[in-house]
């Protein structure tokens, strides 16, 4: 991606000449979404975070139909988690951020040398948090598990890949037996998936890596059946694997269905499970035994986050660099659902004023090129030049204002 100038959102005051005015975000709608979560206390309420610095927190109170910004944090989050009473947690490198007011204000606490790639709360105890990531220890990075028993103020870190360098990616806690915790990741040199299991709430872990994973490179995600802790899904680079005995044995259930960045069972109907991947969502209707590729309505992108409605198994949300997509028919079809979400990274813009006619052209990262003639009240998406990246500069000759010159990676 080409980045010469990055402006988080274009801000217009209704007149190009107005100074010292009250500013508002006017679009275009969409932008990079790293995480989506459903409230644990209100099924209509969803939270999402932007993949940007500073991170923006947006919320929807109508099941993901429309969005508004609820807050921001002057940092970049590698992960976000949610406690049982909707306390928000943001994981970064060396720090954890905590918000009790939907992301409007944040407290932060240090955790030396640890990067939170994933964070989750205990299903019922607000004071207990878990993290997976990597920890700089002994001259290298280790797959590591982090735990807090005081709401994030203090943490203990357990290195899991003590004999090799590696990176942790996911922490999954059984909803029906919270003492069961899985931490996934991968080792380096050579790259191989790794999986660890605790049956005592994180006091100790046992490696349960399956030999059949050796050529699968990475393990990004794990999901535990909400009612039966013996049923576990593990997502690797090439395949999803399924266990019915708590990880003692595994079966390949996808046959080279590539890329699995996020796995989740439906709490409403555990027969339903989803996996987020590259340019596709995969779905199972039989507790993960078999899978289909669901792409109807989805653009190209990486779908690394999923929010399955705990009150309605047909309702699913996912996010990518373009914005948020929503299904109300168990993934058969998807539609963009970024109404009100103004979090795009604006790379370049060019305005033209000829008499009373005002036109603004804009390039937004991963969204394309846009045009507005009413100061951002409405946006028209334009065709994007073919090439290797986003448009990062543009101009219009004064004599021919309808001509737009655009620059990107290939010229």
Image (tube, grey):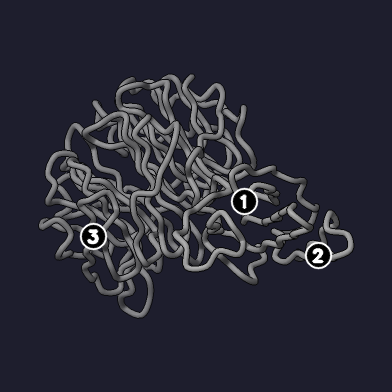
- Name the foreground residue: 66 vs 54: 66
Numbered badge on residue 146: 3
Return the residue found at the far bottom.
139
Could you tell me which residue is drawn at 33 percent across and 74 percent down? 136
- Name the foreground residue: 221 vs 358: 358
User: In the rendered view, would you say 144 is above or below 32?
Assistant: below
Tell me which label, 2 or 1, sits earlier in the chain: 1
Left or right: 156 with respect to 392? left
Tell me which label, 2 or 3, sits earlier in the chain: 3
Which residue, given by chain and number where applicable, does mark 1 sit on?
A: 375
Residue 96: give x, y in percent of width and height: 26, 63
Left or right: 233 with respect to 351? left
Residue 364: give x, y in percent of width and height: 63, 55
Closer to viewer: mark 3 or mark 1: 1
Q: Mark 3, residues whose alpha carbon is within 10 Å: few (<14), some, or many (≥20)?
A: many
- Name the foreground residue: 320 vs 4: 4
User: In the rendered view, would you say 198 is above or below 45?
Assistant: below
Cα distance between the residues tagged 2 and 3: 44 Å
Q: Secondary structure at mark 1?
A: loop
Which residue, given by chain and number where applicable, does mark 2 sit on?
A: 410
- Name the foreground residue: 68 vs 2: 68
Return the residue found at the far front.
355
Cα distance between the residues tagged 3 and 1: 48 Å
Q: Mark 1, residues whose alpha carbon is within 10 Å: few (<14), some, or many (≥20)?
A: some
């Amino acid at each position: 991606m080409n980045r010469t100038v990055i402006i988080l959102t274009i801000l217009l005051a209704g007149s190009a000449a107005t100074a010292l005015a009250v500013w508002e975000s006017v679009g275009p709608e969409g932008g990079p979404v790293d995480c989506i979560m459903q409230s644990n206390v209100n099924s209509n309420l969803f939270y999402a975070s932007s993949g940007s610095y500073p991170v923006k927190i947006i919320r929807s109170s109508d099941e993901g139909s429309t969005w508004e910004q609820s807050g921001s944090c002057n940092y970049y989050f590698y992960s976000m988690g949610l406690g049982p009473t909707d306390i928000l947690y943001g994981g970064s490198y060396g720090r954890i951020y905590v918000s009790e007011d939907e992301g409007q204000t944040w407290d932060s606490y240090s955790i030396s040398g640890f990067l939170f790639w994933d964070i989750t709360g205990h299903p019922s105890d607000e004071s207990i948090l878990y993290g997976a990531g990597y920890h700089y220890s002994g001259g290298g990075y280790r797959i590591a598990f982090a735990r807090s028993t005081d709401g994030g103020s203090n943490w203990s870190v357990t290195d899991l890949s003590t004999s090799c360098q590696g990176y942790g990616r996911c922490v999954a806690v059984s909803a029906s037996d919270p003492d069961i915790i899985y931490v996934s990741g991968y080792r380096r040199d050579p790259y191989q998936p790794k999986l660890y299991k605790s049956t005592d709430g994180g006091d100790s872990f046992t490696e349960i890596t399956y030999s059949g994973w050796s050529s699968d490179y990475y393990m990004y995600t794990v999901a535990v059946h909400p009612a039966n802790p013996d049923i576990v899904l593990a997502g690797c680079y090439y395949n999803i694997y399924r266990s019915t005995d708590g990880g003692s044995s595994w079966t390949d259930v996808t046959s080279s269905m590539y890329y699995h960045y996020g796995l989740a069972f439906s709490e409403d109907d555990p027969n339903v499970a989803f996996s987020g991947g590259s340019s596709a969502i995969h779905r199972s209707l039989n507790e993960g035994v078999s899978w289909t590729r669901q792409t109807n309505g989805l653009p190209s992108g990486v779908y690394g986050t999923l929010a399955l409605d705990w009150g309605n198994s047909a309702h699913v949300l996912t996010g990518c660099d373009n914005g948020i997509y929503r299904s109300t028919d168990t993934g058969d079809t998807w539609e963009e659902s970024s109404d009100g979400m103004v979090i795009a990274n604006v790379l370049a813009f060019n305005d033209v004023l000829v008499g009373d006619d005002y036109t603004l052209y804009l390039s937004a990262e991963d969204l394309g090129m846009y045009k507005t003639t009413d100061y951002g009240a409405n946006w028209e998406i334009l065709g994007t030049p073919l090439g290797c990246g986003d448009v990062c500069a543009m101009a219009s000759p004064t004599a021919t204002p309808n001509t737009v010159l655009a620059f990107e990676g290939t010229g």
